[in-house]
């Protein structure tokens, strides 16, 4: 196993789709899939993994996580909505993602832009904290398991905090 320092560096070096990467014109499904693949492909655990598929997008629309498409093109707002769904679904249940993104009172581009700024701040703060707290390497199976258990608990705390915030969302008129 590579040293933990290398793993931390790699994890926090992920690339994002920047708002300027998203054209100010409507895109076809294949163009959206290409955008995700080109910009986010480096964050895949396995090269054969799919970040986003036509079926996934269609299911997100069907389940109300993304507003329905008119015709065959997706608006910039819908693409930003898809980006928010993409990030949230890595941690939260789809029902919780829907509570956040299946709304008509959200500026998805502003929220996504805020996410990118927050990620930059976290990239500056979290790696040094991890370096102080974590062992330099986890070659020992017991050390690796203990470390993964601890990191999993931190992830659980963050997910539970998100769930608490979602549970406090007021009902939208006409339902959530």
Image (cartoon, rainbow, N blue to C red):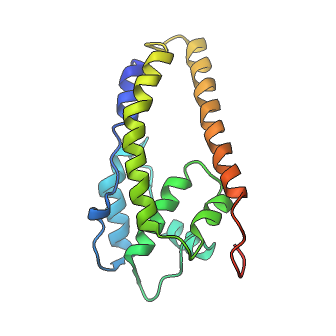
- Image position of 4 with respect to 15: above or below: above
Residue 163 on image: x %, y %: 68, 51
Residue 140 on image: x %, y %: 53, 10
- Image position of 110 with respect to 49: above or below: below
Residue at x 32% of width, y 62% of height? 19
Quarter occupied by residue 136: top left
Using residue 5 as the reference point, say whether residue 81 is left or right of it. Answer: right
Residue 55 on image: x %, y %: 52, 69
- Image position of 88 with respect to 98: above or below: above
- For this orientation, the residue located farthest to the bottom is 71
- Specify the quadrant that holds the C terminus: bottom right
Residue at x 53% of width, y 66% of height? 56
Q: Nearer the viewer, residue 87 or 166?
A: 166
Using residue 64 as the reference point, say whether residue 126 is left or right of it. Answer: left
Q: Is residue 53 visible?
A: no
Q: Is residue 114 visible?
A: yes
Quarter occupied by residue 74: bottom left
Quarter occupied by residue 28: bottom left
- For this orientation, the residue located farthest to the top is 140
Residue 84 on image: x %, y %: 48, 60
Q: Nearer the viewer, residue 162 or 44?
A: 162
- Image position of 98 with respect to 9: above or below: below
- Specify the quadrant that holds the N terminus: top left
Residue at x 38% of width, y 36% of height? 123
Q: How many marks do you count on the picture?
A: 0
Using residue 137 as the reference point, say whether residue 157 is left or right of it. Answer: right
């Amino acid at each position: 196993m590579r040293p933990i320092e290398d793993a931390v560096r790699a994890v926090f070096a992920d690339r994002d789709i920047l708002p300027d990467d998203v054209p100010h014109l409507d895109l076809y499904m294949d163009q959206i899939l290409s955008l995700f693949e080109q910009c986010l492909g480096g964050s895949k655990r396995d090269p054969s993994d799919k970040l986003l598929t036509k079926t996934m997008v269609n299911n997100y629309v069907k389940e109300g996580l993304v507003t329905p498409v008119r015709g065959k093109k997706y608006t910039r707002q819908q693409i930003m909505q898809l980006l928010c769904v993409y990030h949230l679904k890595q941690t939260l249940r789809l029902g919780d993602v829907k509570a956040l993104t299946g709304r008509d009172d959200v500026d998805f581009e502003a929220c996504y832009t805020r996410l990118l700024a927050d990620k930059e701040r976290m990239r500056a703060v979290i790696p040094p904290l991890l370096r102080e707290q974590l062992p330099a390497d986890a070659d020992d199976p017991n050390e690796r398991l203990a470390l993964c258990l601890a990191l999993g608990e931190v992830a659980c705390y963050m997910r539970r905090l998100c769930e608490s915030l979602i549970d406090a969302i007021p009902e939208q008129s006409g339902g959530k």
